[in-house]
Amino acid sequence: MASGDENAERTNRVLRISQLDALELNKALEQLVWSQFTQCFHGFKPGLLARFEPEVKAFLWLFLWRFTIYSKNATVGQSVLNIQYQNDLSPNLSYQPPSRNQKLWYAVCTIGGKWLEERCYDLFRNRHIASFRKAKLCMNLVVGLLKLGGLINFLIFLQRGKFATLTERLLGIHSVFHKPQSVREVGFEYMNRELLWHGFAEFLIFLLPLINVQKLRAKLSSWCVPLTGAPGSNSTLATSGRQCSLCGEWPTMPHTIGCEHVFCYYCVKSSFLFDMSFTCPKCGTEVHSLQPLKSGIEMAEVSVP
C-alpha cells in the first residue's frame, strides 16, 4: 500500500520547470497589471503615484491574492499550468487545500514583505540621523539573511523538487497537479522527418554555390541540341546575330567568342570576368578571344529574315 502511494506521488509530482514557469508567469502578470494601471494616470501630473507607489502595489497584489490563492488555492501562473497548492502539514493522504491561516500568512509574507521593503527603502533613503542609520543597517541585514535563505532553499529545491520558494517551505505548502496527469505517448516521427529535411536543406544551401549552373546548362544543351552549321560561317552568324545568346535581346555592341553565336559586349564581358572558364551557353565553346562582329556582316543584313 505504501509503495503504491509512493508511485502515485512520483507520477503526479510537479516538474521543477513547471513550478519555475508558474513563478515567472506570476511576475509577468504583476508587471502587466502595473503597466496597465499606470496607463490610467498617463494624462495626470507626472509623479502622482510615486509617493504612494508601495501602497498602491500592495493593494493591487492583495486584490489578485483574494481572487487567486484565497479562492482557488493557486496563483494565476499555476492555474495556467494545471497546478495548485496543497497543505503539506496535513496528515491525510488525500488532497487537502491550504488552511485559511496559511493563505493569510502567505499574503503577509509575500505582499506585506514587498511593501515593507519598499516603504523602508523610501523612508531611510534621505535620512542621515544616527538612529535611522542603525535601523537601516538592521533592515539590510534582515533582507540579506532572507535572500540567503531563499538561495539555500532554491538549491534544495533543485535537488528534491519541492518548495520552490522560501515562503512555501515556511508555511508548509507545495505544488500539486489540479487534475491527474495522464501518461502521454510522444511520437518522434514528425521530429525525425523535420530534422531530415532540415539537414538536406542545409546540404543544398552549402552545395549550390559550388556548382557553375551556367556551364552545366551549356554542357547539357551541347549534348541534347545538335549543332547545325559550321562555326564561323557568315550565314549561321547572321541567323544567330538576331539575339544575344545570354540575355535573349537584340545584341548591343555585338561580339563573338570564336563560335557562330553573338553576345552583347557587356553580357559576355561580365560573364567572363565572373568566370574565367566561361563557355558559350549554346554550344559549349570556350572563350578564345572576344572580338566584335565582323565588319562584313551589318546588323541591317542580320535582321533580314
Image (cartoon, helix red, strand yellow):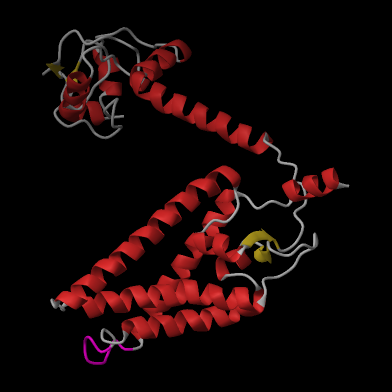
Total marks in image: 0
Foreground of the two, 141 or 105: 141
Q: Residue at x 11, y 18 (%)?
A: 295
Left/right of residue 86 with respect to residue 242 in the rendered view: right
Res 282 → quadrant: top left
Q: Which residues are magenta?
A: 41-48
Where residue 67 appears, x then y in whole percent? 59, 81
Q: Residue at x 35, y 64 (%)?
A: 143
Left/right of residue 67 with respect to residue 94 in the rendered view: left
In the picture as drawn, the residue positioned furthest to the bottom comes out as 44
Can residue 125 be seen here? The reply is no
Q: Residue at x 45, y 76 (%)?
A: 111
Q: Looking at the picture, does residue 297 appear above or below residue 79?
A: above
Where residue 203 appears, x then y in whole percent? 45, 24
Where residue 85 appears, x then y in whole percent? 65, 65
Foreground of the two, 2 or 25: 2
Res 298 → quadrant: top left
Q: Residue at x 77, y 62 (%)?
A: 91
Res 68 → quadrant: bottom right
Does residue 47 show up magenta in the picture?
A: yes
Where residue 257 appears, x then y in whole percent? 20, 14
Does residue 40 show up magenta in the picture?
A: no
Q: Main secondary structure of the magenta part?
A: loop
Can residue 210 be seen here? The reply is yes
Q: Looking at the picture, does residue 293 appear above or below residue 154?
A: above
Image quadrant for the C terminus?
Answer: top left
Left/right of residue 82 with respect to residue 123 in the rendered view: right
Left/right of residue 95 with respect to residue 200 in the rendered view: right
In the picture as drawn, the residue positioned furthest to the right comes out as 1
Foreground of the two, 204 or 47: 47
